[in-house]
Amino acid sequence: MKISTMIRTALIVALCAIPLTAPRPSAAEEGDPAAAAPNPALLDPSLATATAPDVYKVLVETTAGNFVIEVHRDWAPNGADRFYNLVKIGYYNDVAFYRVIKGFMAQTGMNGNPAINTVWRTARIPPDKVKQSNTRGRVTFAMGGSPDTRTTQIFINYGDNDFLDASGFAPIGEVVEDFDTVKELYSGYGEGEPQGKGPSQAKFARGGNDYLKGSFPKLDYITTATIIE
């Protein structure tokens, strides 16, 4: 089915991470940031800059089941390096699939700790050329309007979303095992605010997982993400 130009534009805009005002850390985070972030790199992106292997796999364990992503560095080297480092430091552990749109994509990558979001939201990934298309199962970084604004948020394409390619959305890999699990991620809340009734990125940034679990209790979460190859 062809997607109209208007709908395509809306979907592309919605995939862009909203620029956010830095949330104020809680008293606990101000007093003891190490307690909120056991791995120092979670609060200091400069400590997470390793070069990824040419090809690696990530086991993603979620509340809906498990699946495996295979990442190819030659597809988008800067994005592949960032994803590798984020997985290695545990960034995606206990992170929600807060925006899941049937037939389109499942989006995740905002950390449940507001202090961690604050430091990583400005840790931009250098642009990558689009070498692969956003087809079914491909994994791609979201961005804030242009390819040089990618940071931590990723989405998994549910269908052939090749219309995203021209806007600079560069896939880094694809789901190679248990894609059915991805299709089972909870999608009942639909699009996020202000377009829909789902979670607001701005409120999420301020309130973290407490906001999501209080207002959107049915969301699925990544429990752990681990490099397996």
Image: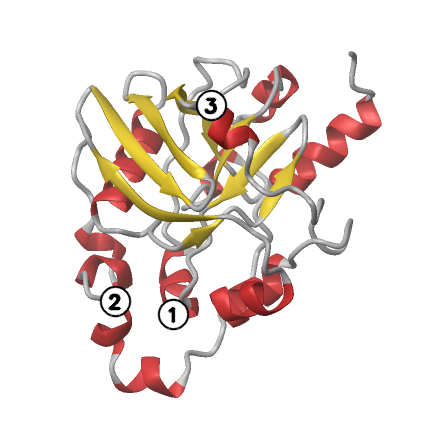
| Identity of the residue drawn at 31% across and 23% down | 71
x and y, in percent, of residue 113 in the image:
40, 66
> Callout 2: 10 Å neighbours few (<14), some, many (20+)?
some
Check if mark 2's residue and mark 1's residue have beta carbons within 8 Å. Answer: yes
Residue 25, percent across and down? 41, 78
Which element type, helix, strand or loop, lies under badge 2?
loop
Q: Residue at x 41, y 82 (%)?
A: 26
Residue at x-position 47% and y-position 41%:
64
Q: Relative to residue 161, is residue 26 depicted above or below?
A: below
Q: Is residue 135 shown left or right of residue 95? A: right
Is the residue marked by circle 1 packed among few (<14), some (14-19), or many (20+) residues within 10 Å? Answer: many
**Type of colouring:** secondary structure
Of discs 1 and 3, which sits in the foreground?
3
Q: Disc 3 marks which residue?
A: 179
Asked whether residue 13 appears in the rendered view, the answer is yes
Q: Is residue 62 above or below residue 156?
A: below
Dot placed on the residue nearer the N-terminal end, 2 or 1: 2
Q: Which mark is residue 37?
A: 2
Residue 21 shows in the view: no
* Whether residue 133 is situated above or below residue 80 in the rendered picture: above
Residue 40 placed where, x, y %? Answer: 18, 63
Question: Which picture quadrant has residue 56?
Answer: top left
The amino acid type of the residue labelled 1 equals Ala
Which mark lies nearer to you, 2 or 1? 2
Q: Which residue is mark 1?
A: 115
Distance from disc 1 to disc 3, alpha carbons, whole Å, reads 32 Å
